[in-house]
Amino acid sequence: MRNLVLTAASAVCALCAITSCNESLSTRTVESNGKFALAEGAADSLDIDIQVEYPETGLKGEALENFRKGLTANLFGEEYAEMDASGALEAYKNDRVSEYREANLPLLEESDGMSHSILSWSDYTYGKISGSHEGIISYTMTKYSYTGGAHGMTSVTSLNFDTRTGSLLSEADFFKEGYRSVLSDLLSRHLPGSLESPEDTSMLFVREIEPNGNFRVSEEGVTYIYNQYEIAPYVMGAIQVTVPWNELEGIYIKK
């Protein structure tokens, strides 16, 4: 499963160099990984892998700080927002290990120390700058979590930052009033072409989709992300639908 999540993260990574050049933004990647045993000598463990990109220079002081805080809060949680990148990563990792052991040690004791598949968890977090357009930088994070059950869950989420202030932009900040019906029509029109095969349309829960606030920008256009179970079954994964800029004329706010 990690390879599948890394593939999604790599697709985001491929855009990084272009984006960084366009915005004169330099970045560094903070990472940590390891397997943390449920108990001494136990075969069960929590597998953690974190690889996240952070801006270093290229934005003005306050904007850079706002960007970093916004990233940290969304990557790890609001409680880590005031920490620097490395500190937030380590605190998050330690908290996940504590949570894992607290939840599963009683189950291990009940099973007389016998290993069981539901006692081995996974927690992966990947984040990369994924695009830019007219004063907006998009950052996409991919998170995978397995805490027992038939399968884990992968979510792909994009954040959009104003390069002047470093603040997060919402969908309402980006589009003009009354945009939803027009954008829904455009997304629905491009949905079939976003699937791996035309036959996959038969698996969709819905064929007329609405904007969900989860989007990124690029030189190509605006790409909306629909995660597992949102508009299609688990097996189809995250579906990404791109609407070109020329079709968005009149409904988005130019920066």
Image (cartoon, rainbow, N blue to C red):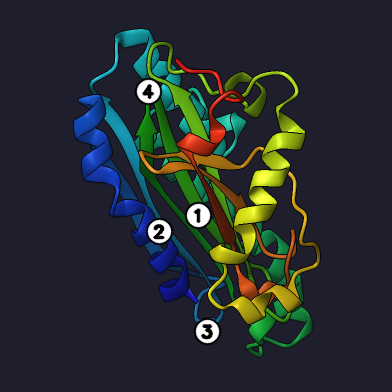
Three-letter amino acid code at the position of disc 2: Ala
Do the residues bearing badges 1 and 2 touch, measured as CB atoms within 8 Å? yes
- Residue ID for mark 3: 43
What's the mark number on residue 119?
none
Viewer-nearest residue: 176 or 29: 176
Three-letter amino acid code at the position of disc 3: Ala
- Rounded to the nearest whole Å, what is the CA distance between mark 3 and mark 2? 29 Å
Chain-order first, disc 4 or disc 3 = 3
Do the residues bearing badges 3 and 1 touch, measured as CB atoms within 8 Å? no
- Rounded to the nearest whole Å, what is the CA distance between mark 1 and mark 2? 6 Å
Chain-order first, disc 2 or disc 4 = 2
Three-letter amino acid code at the position of disc 1: Thr
Q: Quadrant of residue 203?
A: bottom right
- Residue ID for mark 1: 142
Image coordinates for residue 193, horizontal then vertical, percent: 56, 64
Foreground: disc 4 or disc 3: 4
Three-letter amino acid code at the position of disc 4: Glu
Task: Work out which quarter of the rendered image holds the C terminus and state it.
Answer: top left
Q: What secondary structure is found at the residue carrying circle 1?
A: strand
Residue at 37% in and 53% down: 12
- Residue ID for mark 4: 134
- Rounded to the nearest whole Å, what is the CA distance between mark 4 and mark 1? 24 Å
Foreground: disc 2 or disc 4: 4
Residue 211 visible in image:
no
Image coordinates for residue 183, horizontal then vertical, percent: 67, 38
Q: What secondary structure is found at the residue carrying circle 4?
A: loop
